[in-house]
Image (cartoon, rainbow, N blue to C red):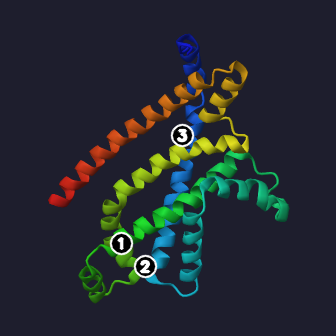
Amino acid sequence: MRPLDTAYMWDLVPVIAGYVPLTMFMAIVAMVGALTLGAALAIVRVLRIPVLDRFVAVFISFFRATPLLVQLFLFYFGLPQVMPALTGIDGVTAAIIGLTLHFSAYMAESIRGAILGVDRSQWEAAQSVGMTRGQVLRRIILPQGARTAAPTLMNYFIDMIKGTSLAFTLGVTEMMGAAQKEAAGSFLYLEAFLVVALFYWVIVETLSIGQRRLEISLGKAVAR
């Protein structure tokens, strides 16, 4: 059994660190897109808008029931064969769109559950003073639902960061892609993948600390 090449691992740290910004960029942009789309899908489901409701239900079912990797391949390699306009899309954009669509389906259900968890009497009280359904949602229901859904949405963001590692299958050189290239050149696969695993670990643990603080803060707000 050969010992770990720690010198190689230390040399690899700045290389992998150079791709952290791209990884975080993809995750943050996808998070904003998924949160926006997920909220819209949740509202359609809550209000049971005719026709749209059934379309959204199918959308959510598909993206929750199929693997993210399959969706990325379908979007990046499959759709351009029937939609030539997509042939010019680059791997980063494809990865962001894939992550957005995939996680928006999960976020939609979380947000919908949070909205439905708000006491029905608040809907009735607000509508009794002349508020429309849209005003009730925007001013009363969504702020309360957001507080309930926040910890779960943070979990999805953490999963999204880990999901960016699949972008290397589309030719994107992010943290995982960089580790793969370095390992292929040195044949030190254990060291290369261990370094990138530690990077993901540190990033996720840092966000988890922020998540726990957020939960404590929200708990105090509810207690008041």
Label 3 CA crowd tier, 10 Å (few <14, some 14–19, many 20+): some
On screen, residue 56 versus residue 139, left or right, reads right
Q: Is residue 63 above or below residue 176?
A: below
Q: Quadrant of the N terminus?
A: top right
The residue furthest top is 7
Q: Quadrant of the C terminus?
A: bottom left
Task: For the residues labelled 3 and 1, say whether their Cβ atoms are less than 8 Å apart.
Answer: no
Label 1 CA crowd tier, 10 Å (few <14, some 14–19, many 20+): many
Along the viewing direction, whichever of 49 and 156 lies nearer the viewer: 156
Q: Please tell me which of labels 3 and 2 falls first in the chain.
A: 3
On screen, residue 75 versus residue 110, left or right, reads right
Along the viewing direction, whichever of 63 and 38 lies nearer the viewer: 63
Give the Cα separation between the discs numbered 2 and 1.
8 Å
Q: Residue at x 81, y 51 (%)?
A: 88
x, y percentage for residue 117?
Answer: 30, 73
Q: Is residue 153 above or below residue 108?
A: above
**Residue beneath label 1, please?**
115
Q: Residue at x 20, y 56 (%)?
A: 221
Q: Amino acid at mark 3?
A: Met
Q: Secondary structure at mark 1?
A: helix
x, y percentage for residue 123?
Answer: 30, 82
**Residue beneath label 3, please?**
24
Q: Is residue 207 above or below residue 125?
A: above
Along the viewing direction, whichever of 77 and 221 lies nearer the viewer: 77
Q: Please tell me which of labels 3 and 1 falls first in the chain.
A: 3
Which mark, by number, is residue 46?
A: 2
On screen, residue 221 versus residue 168, left or right, reads left
Q: Secondary structure at mark 3?
A: helix
x, y percentage for residue 133?
Answer: 39, 82
Task: For the residues labelled 2 and 1, say whether their Cβ atoms are less than 8 Å apart.
Answer: yes
